[in-house]
Amino acid sequence: MRLFKLFTTSLVLGLIGLFFYENATVFKTSLPFTLDLYIREQVNWTYPLYTVLVFAVLVGFVAGIGVLLKPYLHMRRMLAQEHQEKESPSALPHPPALAPSEGNADEQGIQTAGTESDQTRQEP
């Protein structure tokens, strides 16, 4: 199996090398570029095709890594903020949830069950 892997890897690398060898003249052709911002004179330059292709691959690779890491970095930022909030509580703590009082409950139309002491108490 090790020999088969070695053979197939060398065959694939050989085909890739043959592709670049056969197309060397195409990759070496110069591409003219012109930049005209209508402010100053036109800027002209030429680059070989292989330089343009390598630049495009590198830009794509960097953009892909950036898109890949964006959720990871966002999550780390959120965790760091949460950790900081746990270490230093805010100056104004949140008030505890208050149950409605009996007087307030009647106004809201909520019936509250009386406590045991209310039920045993007799009013004159």
Image (cartoon, rainbow, N blue to C red):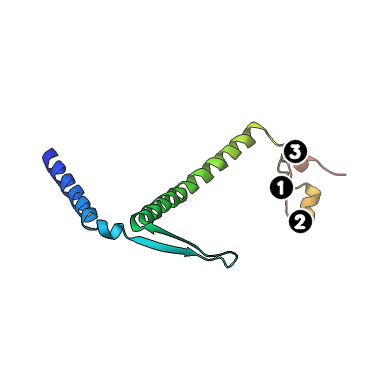
Q: Is residue 81 left or right of residue 69?
A: right
Callout 1 crowding tier (Cα within 10 Å): few <14, some 14–19, many ≥20? few
Quadrant (top left/top right/bottom left/bottom right) for the N terminus: top left
| Viewer-side residue, 59 vs 24 | 24
Local secondary structure at mark 3: loop
* Residue located 36% across and 52% down the image: 54
**Residue 18's spot in the image, x, y percent?**
19, 53
Please say if the residues under marks 1 and 3 sit with CB atoms less than 8 Å apart: no
Outermost residue toward the bottom in this view:
38
Callout 3 crowding tier (Cα within 10 Å): few <14, some 14–19, many ≥20? few
* Residue located 79% across and 56% down the image: 107
Q: What is the distance, in whole Å, between disc 2 and disc 1 at their CAs? A: 15 Å
| Viewer-side residue, 116 vs 66 | 66
Disc number at residue 38?
A: none
> Identity of the amino acid at label 2?
Gln
Q: Which residue is identified by label 1? A: 113
Q: Which residue is identified by label 2? A: 108
Please say if the residues under marks 2 and 3 sit with CB atoms less than 8 Å apart: no
Disc number at residue 92?
A: 3
| Viewer-side residue, 35 vs 123 | 35
Q: What is the distance, in whole Å, between disc 1 and disc 3 at their CAs? A: 34 Å
| Mark in front: 2 vs 3 | 3
* Residue located 40% across and 55% down the image: 56
Mark 2 vs 3, N-terminal side: 3
* Residue located 32% across and 60% down the image: 29
